[in-house]
């Protein structure tokens, strides 16, 4: 048994970023053609596109502000024209900000997190899900976080936005299930990406002590789950919230 995405087209938001790059590569390794979304780092996006083309995959980079509905619509039009509408949608982009205690957190950070989590999901769904409904097939994978469950200090803006995202995803899963579209979430823990590898991996002993598998997760751990949920091996899984956090998060029944 292997994950086979041959003949499928995917779009990954935040595809030029740390986690996104590994997800893009993994989908391509499984046979998918991949559209790479980016906001500002065109150079990284284009270099990733060249990697995928060297593998024999179709790929292209598309710039978009995922908090702006008109920008998302423009990206949809460009994707349809120059790449083809995707069968797989990975919602991964998020605005980065400095975490502080709630009483010190800037109000604008709550708005930016809501826009980049909840509203990104709304905009992307409105633009790309209608095609999935028409063809009666689609796979949607959404990046959530262990923070949505743990609700630890100093992450109130991030946690509140991701919990709102969770609600949107669960509703969408029920609304499009009859169209053979699955909608699932991955909740990573504190994940090691290439950026951290280049700058020195934080061993984080206090964090690792709270992880039953006694290590931090890697971008490949997350990407492997994304590829599985994007495949027909997961065709009867929808509405799931799946922690990939080494057991640090264990949602109860």
Image (spheres, rainbow, N blue to C red):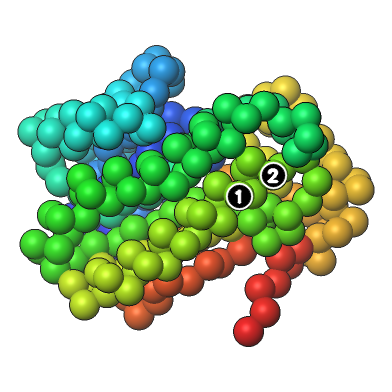
Residue at 23% from the left image edge and 49% from the top image edge: 126
Disc 1 packing (10 Å; few <14; some 14–19; many ≥20)? some
Q: Quadrant of the C terminus?
A: bottom right
The number of numbered discs placed on residues in the rendered structure image is 2
Mark 2: few, some, or many residues within 10 Å (few <14, many ≥20)? many
Element marked by disc 2:
helix
The residue positioned 30% from the left and 24% from the top of the image is 63
Asked where in the image residue 229 lies, by quadrant, the reply is: bottom left
Q: Which residue is mark 2?
A: 156
Determine whether 62 is above or below 235 in the image: above
Residue 134: x and y in percent read: 8, 62
- The correct choice, above or below, for 125 with respect to 179 in the image is above
Left or right placement of residue 176 versus residue 200 in this view: left
For the N terminus, the image quarter is: bottom left
Report the front residue among 41 and 26.
41
Which percent across, then down, holds residue 187?
58, 57
Q: From this viewpoint, is residue 22 visible?
A: no
Does residue 251 lie above or below 69 as drawn?
A: below
Q: Which residue is mark 1?
A: 160
């Amino acid at each position: 048994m292997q994950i086979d995405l041959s003949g499928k087209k995917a779009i990954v938001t935040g595809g030029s970023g740390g986690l996104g790059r590994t997800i893009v590569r993994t989908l391509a390794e499984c046979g998918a053609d991949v559209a790479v979304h980016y906001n500002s780092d065109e150079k990284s996006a284009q270099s990733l596109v060249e990697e995928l083309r060297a593998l024999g995959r179709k790929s292209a980079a598309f710039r978009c502000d995922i908090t702006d509905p008109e920008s998302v619509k423009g990206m949809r039009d460009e994707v349809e024209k120059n790449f083809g509408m995707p069968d797989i949608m990975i919602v991964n982009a998020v605005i980065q900000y400095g975490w502080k205690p709630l009483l010190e957190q800037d109000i604008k950070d709550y708005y930016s997190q809501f826009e980049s989590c909840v509203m990104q999901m709304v905009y992307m769904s409105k633009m790309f899900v209608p095609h999935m409904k028409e063809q009666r097939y689609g796979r949607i994978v959404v990046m959530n976080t262990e923070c949505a469950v743990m609700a630890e200090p100093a992450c109130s803006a991030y946690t509140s936005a991701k919990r709102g995202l969770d609600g949107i995803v669960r509703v969408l899963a029920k609304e499009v299930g009859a169209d053979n579209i699955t909608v699932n979430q991955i909740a990573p823990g504190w994940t090691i990406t290439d950026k951290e590898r280049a700058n020195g991996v934080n061993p984080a002993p206090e964090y690792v002590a709270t992880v039953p598998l006694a290590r931090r997760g890697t971008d490949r751990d997350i990407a492997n789950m994304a590829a599985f949920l994007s495949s027909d091996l997961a065709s009867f899984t929808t509405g799931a919230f799946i922690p990939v956090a080494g057991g640090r998060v264990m949602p109860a029944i």
